Amino acid sequence: MAEASEASERLPASRMTSQYCTFCQLVAGNLPIRKVYEDGEILVFHNQLNWVPVMLLIIPKVHMTQEEVWQSGDLLGRMGQKAVELGDEHCPRGYRVLANFGADAVQSQHHGHLHVIGGVHLGLYVRNPLEH
């Protein structure tokens, strides 16, 4: 849990949570989720989107950007370990762990996070049914 404390020390108090951040609201318990896992640093839940059978989101409980998550060292490592553990559990035939950075990658949340997707043959890329 030292990493969450270190992350908190790196970020200004105004960035630790955001009343306008959906993921911060989920961490605070202000919005419903289908929780898969939680500890002192990370929260894992089912994405409300259902483009493929398994769509998990892994987020730090402290508000961080994607770039900050990927530079966080131990925290990113723990998130990655949890992604592999839950991917193996929920998608024994295979899965993807991914992160989106910026508008061209269709990043919709500024709170850093990882996706675990699977439960079906994914092919070369996941197709967004909203684009077809």
Image (cartoon, grey):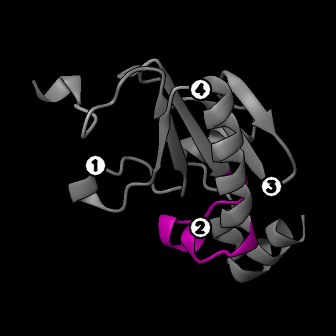
What span is in magenta? Answer: 60-74
Instruction: State which tag comes first along the sequence, 3 or 2.
Output: 3
Residue of label 3: 41
Quadrant of residue 78 within the rendered picture: bottom right
Instruction: State which tag comes first along the sequence, 2 or 4.
Output: 2
Marks 3 and 1, how far apart in space? 25 Å
Instruction: State which tag comes first along the sequence, 1 or 2.
Output: 2
Name the amino acid, label 1: Val
CB-based contact (under 8 Å), mark 4 and mark 1:
no
Determine which of the numbered discs, if any, sits on residue 69 in the image: 2
Q: Nearer the viewer, residue 9 or 79?
A: 79
Determine which of the numbered discs, if any, sits on residue 92 in the image: 4
| Label 2: how many Cα within 10 Å (few below 14, some 14–19, many 20+) | many
Find out whether residue 8 is within the magenta segment: no
Instruction: Look at the image and tell me whether residue 32 can be seen.
Output: no
Q: Please state which of the two labelled residues, at mark 2 or mark 4, is closer to the viewer.
A: 4
